[in-house]
Amino acid sequence: MPSVTLPPDIQPSRTAQPATGEPATTVTLLAPNRGEEGALRVPHKELVAYSLAGAGEGMASSIFGALTMPILNIFLGINPGLISTILSIRGILDACCDPIIGHASDNFRSKWGRRRPFILVGGLISGGLLSAIWCFNPAWSHHAILTWFLCLYLLFSIGYSLFSVGYFALGIELAPSYHERTRVVAYRSVVSKPFSLLSMWFYSFALLPVFSNELAGARWLALLTSLVVIGTCTMTFLGTRERTKYVVGKKKENLIHALKSTYTNPEFLRVTMIYVVMNTSLALFGIFGTFVNIFYVFGGNKTAGAAMSATAATIGWVCAWFSIPLVTWFSRRHQKHNTLRAALVLMIVGGILKFWCFNPKYPYLQLALPFFFSTGIAGVYTVLSSMQADVVDLDELRSGQRREGIFGAAGGWVMKSAGALAGVLSGVMLNATGYNVALGGHQSPRTYFWMLFLFSIGTAGMNSFCFLLLWRYPLTESRMIEIRTELDRRHAAENNDA
């Protein structure tokens, strides 16, 4: 098996033993195709095969956000507080499972590799359960429906964690160099984006007159999504290969110690907190958008409200898609943290405008919001991912180790735990506004005011807090050049000593 020298950006420390006395990690990399200037290249066919599972992953995740509250609350009349509690329990389970599954995947050995078996098994489990979740009898009691939904939803969540953790870990391993990993992510985005566009119309699909009711529509949609998940994860399993083989000493890395050191990294905490506040804001207040549109703007007309929400989301998708090159250009000229500030300003403005743009007299006014809010979101998440990589470089400078995995697990744990709490609070806050599903489009003026206020001003307020977290952000362009230069010097010295 030919060996290839790893590029500097993922070069592990080979000459020094870790401070804990654990044996050093060695890496053997199978030689992939080479492109210009000797850069390691992943074949296009394999990139497409890898990206396909991203489409299934996105659809499986989106179907619950699109259908759970409308089906269980608007159609069946179940208390939204109970529904949001169920959704948050899944978030808690994910937060606990992801680090464990990630650690198990790191240490798994089979003739099919470490990641691909997790993708296949997790995809089959989650895809198989996806349609079964919606097969309850609407004549059952609310307690029986929620019990059925919760049990199968949690089993689905375990399968989904197996699939998603293995999938994203494989994406990192497909190519070792920084720019090639960017190419992998770009392929995944291009292939999965059309499927994410479909997810915006899930509820409208369930409301089509061809179905007897929206639950029947949800069942058909879940079945189609199950087939997509199972098919795409199978194609990814068959069409990709794992290039890295880790040969580690008998003593395994202490997961608890690694997590503890990660949570004491101030730069990591700052970037992660921005993620947490952003995701919490979307989970906490995003629920009000559907209710405001259906009951306030369209007077209880579910079809019209769902169609308008989907149209706005489609415009947002287009804005986000075309704004990415602009975000990249702006970041090169004005640095990442300033680009993030600009994106947050767009989100804050868009959030404030929601209060006036969701208007029963002028319902189409809300279609202007994606040009602010969705463009801002695209900028935020594009830049934050790059800022996380900067934090990993800084950690390597301090610890001598590349720990992308542990940073991903630690960040995921914090974000999913916060999302779970936000899920509980969203239903509670909806009840606190005085919302009553039995009143349909005849909610009280007070209820509509607080729905609009939380949906708009609440979102803008939390985004303003993210803006404050960027005060005197230390990892500027000049600082990262210093860090990268020192890491390259270390890697060159280690290679000479090896």
Image (cartoon, helix red, strand yellow):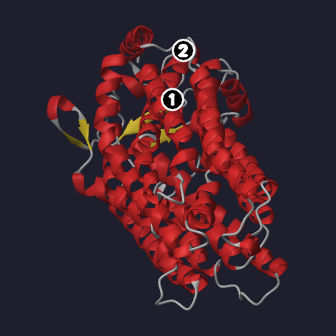
Residue in front for this viewpoint, 259 or 381: 381
Quadrant of residue 106 within the rendered picture = top right
User: Residue 302: image x %, image y %?
Assistant: 56, 73
How far from the left and from the top, in percent, is residue 74?
A: 67, 73
Above-or-below relation of 478 to 292: above
Name which residue type carries label 1: Gln
Q: Amino acid at mark 2?
A: Tyr
Q: Nearer the viewer, residue 115 or 295?
A: 295
Q: Determine if residue 294 is in view.
A: yes
Residue at 72%, 79% (x, y): give it. 76
Of marks 1 and 2, which one's residue comes earlier in the chain?
A: 1
Residue 359 percent across, percent down from the top left: 53, 55
Residue occupying image coordinates x 72% and y 87% = 138
Mark 2 element type: loop
Which is nearer the eye, 169 or 15? 169
Q: Is the Cβ of the residue at disc 1 closer than 8 Å to that at disc 2?
A: no
Q: Label 2: how many residues lie within 10 Å, few (<14), some (14-19) or many (20+)?
A: few
Residue at mark 2: 473
User: Which numbered disc, 1 or 2, marks the residue closer to the eye?
Assistant: 2
Q: Which quarter of the picture shows residue 118?
A: bottom right
Residue in the picture at 32% in, 60% down = 49
Look at the numbered disc 1 and give the secondary structure of its residue. Answer: helix
Q: Residue at x 54, y 60 (%)?
A: 360
Q: Is residue 464 above or below residue 102?
A: above
Left or right, residue 443 beside residue 388: right
Q: In this image, 163 relative to 497: left or right?
A: right
The residue to which callout 1 is attached is 388
Which disc number belongs to residue 19?
none
